């Protein structure tokens, strides 16, 4: 029997050993992506929102935890005794010194096989081109008849009808009632689609509420998918909740996250939009009519102005005014002419007066003559000494005797 040595080559603390084991486990890729099947027990969900559980089978048990961020996405209520498959990674909770599963997905046993079938069908139908974007048809803006394929008793129908009445009460709504899960659902869904196409529906809604993959499986049925792809009317799918995807979503012309959203997408133009458009059209028509009337009034005023310009009455008024003008001219012309002649004569008189010898005398000049014959003496040489002369000034005349001293 081997005796332990008193001085071990390596001494571990519990913390160091647990940390080492954690590193070893987390370094193994096979343990970081595992699916574990077992029966649930000790399921608890405290106020933190995290989910704690134990997976067990006949031979062992495994503690597990799912953090709140993943637990809020769970679609099924977990309970003790449920057979599930949990996906996640293996780690060690160091405080408790135990290994456990950190889960991110939990699904019922058998769902994995359904998902594999889902992927197989999706790949096959996609290869045939049933999901091509080029096949998608445009949703009408203002449908007159809306078809619905869903359960007549489900909450999905009530939600859709409420949305349609609120948004577009003018549209006719036709229901093709059908079960939405179980073996009878696929042929009934196909029959509903065919019936709504026969009555020339403008758009078709195929919808139901949320559920597990088994609950929604009818909407992954190949017959339903092909019926949607072959529909003459565009199809909007509203199956499950926002995180649920079925093959009908890929085949439909438009996918809605919920049934209510499908009803909203089927009525892009609402009654409010129509009322607003009518009001806008009314305002535009009023403005156009007012503008046209104003343009007509201006045009009529221009025509009246042109008519008045070419009117005989206007020409008569113009000619009458012209006659009055000529009459005034005829009356004024002689007086004007006489005034011009009078001014001309006055001007000549002034010129004659300016040229008169008397005017010269008035400026200080004198006229010298011989009294005997009245001849003018124009120069000193004509005057004789002691000769009697007559001198005429502006206001009269007087006699004078030539002095010798004045001779040259």
Image (cartoon, helix red, strand yellow):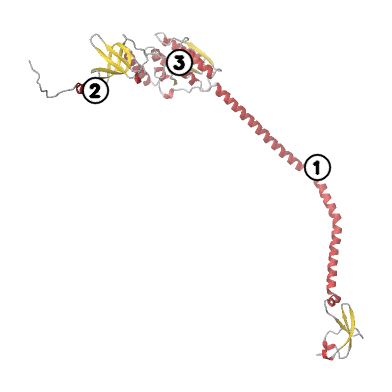
Q: Is residue 320 left or right of residue 28?
A: right
Q: Can residue 206 be seen from the camera position used here? A: yes
The numbered mark, 2 or 3, whose residue comes first in the sequence reads: 2
The reply to whether discs 2 and 3 touch (Cβ–Cβ < 8 Å) is no
Residue linked to disc 3 = 206
Looking at the picture, how far across and down is residue 100, in whole percent? 26, 17
- Distance CA(mark 2)–CA(mark 3): 46 Å
Q: Residue furthest front?
A: 6
The reply to whether discs 1 and 3 touch (Cβ–Cβ < 8 Å) is no
Q: Pointer 2: residues within 10 angstroms few (<14), some, or many (20+)? A: some
Q: Nearer the viewer, mark 2 or mark 3?
A: 2
The quadrant of the image that shows the N terminus is top left
Looking at the picture, how far across and down is residue 327, in whole percent? 85, 52
Q: Nearer the viewer, mark 2 or mark 1?
A: 2
The numbered mark, 2 or 1, whose residue comes first in the sequence reads: 2
Q: Is residue 382 above or below residue 190?
A: below
- Find residue 26 and name its label: 2
Q: Residue furthest left?
A: 1
Q: Is residue 302 left or right of residue 88?
A: right
Looking at the picture, how far across and down is residue 343, in whole percent? 84, 64
Q: Nearer the viewer, residue 178 or 350?
A: 350
């Amino acid at each position: 029997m081997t005796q332990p040595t008193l001085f071990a080559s390596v001494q571990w603390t519990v913390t160091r050993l647990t940390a080492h084991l954690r590193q070893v486990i987390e370094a193994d890729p096979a343990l970081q992506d595992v699916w574990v099947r077992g029966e649930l027990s000790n399921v608890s969900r405290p106020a933190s929102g995290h989910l704690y559980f134990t997976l067990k089978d006949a031979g062992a048990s495994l503690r597990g935890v799912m953090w709140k961020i993943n637990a809020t996405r769970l679609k099924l209520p977990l309970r003790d005794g449920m057979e599930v498959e949990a996906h996640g990674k293996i780690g060690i909770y160091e405080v408790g010194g135990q290994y456990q599963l950190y889960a991110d997905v939990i699904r019922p046993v058998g769902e994995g096989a359904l998902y594999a079938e889902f992927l197989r069908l999706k790949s096959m139908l996609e290869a045939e081109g049933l999901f091509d974007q080029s096949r998608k048809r445009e949703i009408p803006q203002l449908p007159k008849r809306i078809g619905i394929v869903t359960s007549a008793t489900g909450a999905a129908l009530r939600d859709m009808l409420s949305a349609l009445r609120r948004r577009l009460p003018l549209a006719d709504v036709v229901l093709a009632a059908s079960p939405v899960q179980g073996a009878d659902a696929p042929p009934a869904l196909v029959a509903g689609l065919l019936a709504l196409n026969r009555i020339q529906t403008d758009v078709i809604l195929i919808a139901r509420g949320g559920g597990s993959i088994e609950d929604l499986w009818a909407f992954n049925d190949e017959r339903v998918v092909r019926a949607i792809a072959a529909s003459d009317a565009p199809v909007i799918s509203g199956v499950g909740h926002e995180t649920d995807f079925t093959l009908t979503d890929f085949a439909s012309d438009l996918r809605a996250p919920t049934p209510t959203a499908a009803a909203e997408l089927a009525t892009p133009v609402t009654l409010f939009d129509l009322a607003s458009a009518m009001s806008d059209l009314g305002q535009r028509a009023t403005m156009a009519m007012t503008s046209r009337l104003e343009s007509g009034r201006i045009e009529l005023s221009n025509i009246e102005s042109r008519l008045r310009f070419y009117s005989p009455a206007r020409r008569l008024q113009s000619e009458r005014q012209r006659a009055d003008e000529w009459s005034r001219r005829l009356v004024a012309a002689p007086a004007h002419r006489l005034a011009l002649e009078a001014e001309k004569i006055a001007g000549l008189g002034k010129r004659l007066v300016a040229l008169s010898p008397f005017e010269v005398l008035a400026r200080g000049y004198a006229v010298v003559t011989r009294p005997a014959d009245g001849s003018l003496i124009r120069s000193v040489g004509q005057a004789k000494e002691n000769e009697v002369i007559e001198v005429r000034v502006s206001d009269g005349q007087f006699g004078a005797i030539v002095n010798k001293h004045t001779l040259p």
